[in-house]
Image (spheres, rainbow, N blue to C red):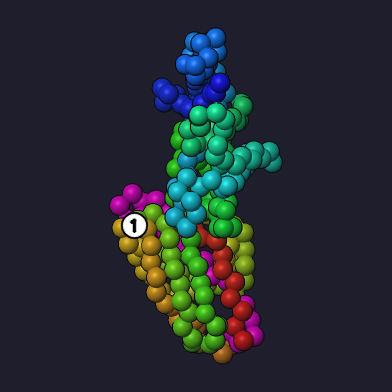
Amino acid sequence: HGSAIGDLNGDLYPDTYFCNGGPSSYPNSNGTNSLFMSQKTANHVLRVTATGTLSNRFGIGANVSVFLPGGRAIHRTFTAGKGFLNTDEPALYIGLGADSSVDYLQIVWPNGNYQRVLAPSVDTSLSFTETGIKVTGTPALGGLMDISGFGPGDDQVTLYYSTNPDFLISPANGGVLELQAPLISLGSFNLDAAGFYTGTFTLPSDPLLSGTTIYMQAFFENLVSGAKGLSTRVDIAIP
């Protein structure tokens, strides 16, 4: 009548439980429930979970891509709902086959924000908390812009901008740097314990930037755990 999949013994290999019992009013529909435990192999795996902040709590609809050496990529999506009176564990199990390393893993949230983790260890579990910034307002030289930040609670966030975009895998910054050096600071703030911040920042007043686009990215760092990450790049056209 139904089945549910999840890792019951913590070995990163998903197990399956089958419910074969029917309603008591139909005795002939009753059957024996069954639990099937997966057997480990020499292949490698990643387990991924997601916690939404702006998106839904379990990240339903978020797309995960694993990029492997040699150009191969694996794509999975967080879903909900399974069948009759059951649902699976809210986690993705991504089989890597014989690949023993990963270039980087990317998660794209339902609202379009994305995050990347570089060279994660295989045969482990990764947990993502939705992280990023949202900028609103009317750009002007030296003008104030509204900003909201979201991510792991108590993270320190530093804003940088550049006049040129880039795509550079940057282990030192915990993600893909989408700015080209030199990077210029626009200030910093801290997320609260719940992982949110609302405030303002000032755009640069350099008259040479008039009529150009600046490219801004937020650097997230947890000073306790040492975890680092980068937001999606935000492009701001200055009149």
Look at the image and tell me whether residue 37 can be seen: no
Q: In the image, what residue type sits under mark 1?
A: Ala
Q: Is 130 one of the magenta-colored residues?
A: no
Q: Is residue 53 above or below residue 8?
A: below
Residue found 68% across the figure and 38% down from its top:
72
Question: Callout 1: few (<14), some (14-19), or many (20+) C-alpha neighbours within 10 Å?
Answer: few
- Left or right of 189? Residue 166 is right
- Name the one closer to the observer, 148 or 65: 148
Where 37 falls versus 127 (above or below)?
Answer: above
Q: Quadrant of the N terminus?
A: top right
Near-viewer residue (171 or 59): 59
Q: In which quadrant of the rendered view does residue 209 lie?
A: bottom right
Residue 221 among those drawn in magenta? yes
Residue plotted at (58% across, 62% down): 178
Q: Residue furthest right?
A: 71
Q: Position of residue 84 (x, y in %)?
A: 55, 28
Q: Position of residue 227 (x, y in %)?
A: 39, 51
Give the residues in magenta. Answer: 209-228
Q: Nearer the viewer, residue 79 or 83?
A: 83
Q: Position of residue 105 (x, y in %)?
A: 56, 44
Give the residue at mark 1.
194
